[in-house]
Image (spheres, rainbow, N blue to C red):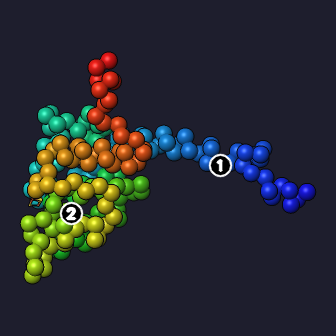
């Protein structure tokens, strides 16, 4: 009899498999987190100007719930690496990332953050050629600089990565109705 119990599949069992009960809760948490990022107030070079612009009225990142830029890494869950990461700055970037509570995400904004950008050439020794070499990166937004719309597109990609669903732009039918 004991052997037969071991062969029960989840469908035959009287106890629901944990995943059935936990997954909707996880989905709700993922949705809430992806629609209410708290980015860190943190810029390294010219790409940071584009990051600032995305908070202004024309691009209005508040429409997507990510306007609450936080002055402390302990209050932030999204690091937007906007600009050139020098080797001198790299330890500070790592420290800030480690001070952010989990779950946390990182966006590499611009060619400098992705690969060193125009400062990446043979013989250079002062620039980190890709912030993903020092911390994990979730989304890469290319450009020198990327426009604010690029940052928003990166935000949508991050939301899709977390929830498994593309939320913006709204389907045309929803816009018209
Ligand atoms: S990618 Fe271009 S705009 Fe952005 S920080 Fe580097 S040089 Fe400046």
Label of residue 114 in the image: 2
Q: Quadrant of residue 107?
A: bottom left
The residue sitting at the top extreme is: 177
Q: CA distance from mark 2 to mark 1?
A: 39 Å
Q: Quadrant of residue 176?
A: top left
Q: Which residue sits at x=59%, y=45%?
A: 22
156 left or right of 52?
right
Spot occupied by residue 53 in the image (x, y as percentages of width and height): 13, 43
Question: Is any part of residue 3 visible from this angle?
Answer: yes
Q: In this orientation, which residue lies closer to the viewer: 106 or 97?
A: 106
Circle 2 — which element?
Answer: helix
Q: Which residue sits at x=29%, y=26%?
A: 172
User: Dot 2: few (<14), some (14–19), or many (≥20) neighbours within 10 Å?
Assistant: many
The quadrant of the image that shows the N terminus is bottom right
Q: Which residue sits at x=28%, y=46%?
A: 155
The quadrant of the image that shows the C terminus is top left
Check disc 1 and report the residue beneath it: 18
10 left or right of 39?
right
Tell which circle, 2 or 1, labels the residue nearer the N-terminal end. 1
Spot occupied by residue 52 in the image (x, y as percentages of width and height): 14, 46
User: Does residue 89 lie above or below 22 as drawn?
Assistant: below
Question: Is any part of residue 47 visible from this angle?
Answer: no
- In which of the image's four quarters is ligand 1 placed? bottom left
Total marks in image: 2
Q: Which residue sits at x=15%, y=60%?
A: 111
């Amino acid at each position: 009899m004991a052997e037969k119990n071991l062969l029960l599949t989840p469908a035959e069992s009287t106890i629901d498999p944990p995943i059935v009960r936990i997954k909707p809760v996880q989905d709700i948490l993922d949705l809430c987190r992806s629609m209410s990022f708290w980015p860190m107030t943190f810029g390294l070079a010219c790409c940071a100007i584009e990051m600032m612009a995305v908070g202004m009225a024309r691009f209005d990142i508040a429409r997507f719930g990510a306007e609450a830029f936080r002055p402390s890494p302990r209050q932030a869950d999204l690091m937007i690496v906007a600009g050139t990461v020098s080797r001198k700055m790299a330890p500070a970037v790592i420290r800030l990332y480690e001070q952010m509570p989990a779950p946390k995400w990182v966006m590499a904004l611009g060619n400098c953050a992705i690969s060193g950008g125009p400062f990446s050439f043979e013989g250079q020794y002062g620039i980190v050629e890709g912030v993903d070499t020092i911390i994990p990166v979730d989304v890469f937004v290319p450009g020198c600089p990327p426009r604010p719309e690029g940052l928003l597109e990166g935000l949508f990609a991050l939301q899709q990565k977390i929830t498994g669903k593309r939320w913006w732009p709204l389907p045309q039918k929803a816009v018209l109705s």
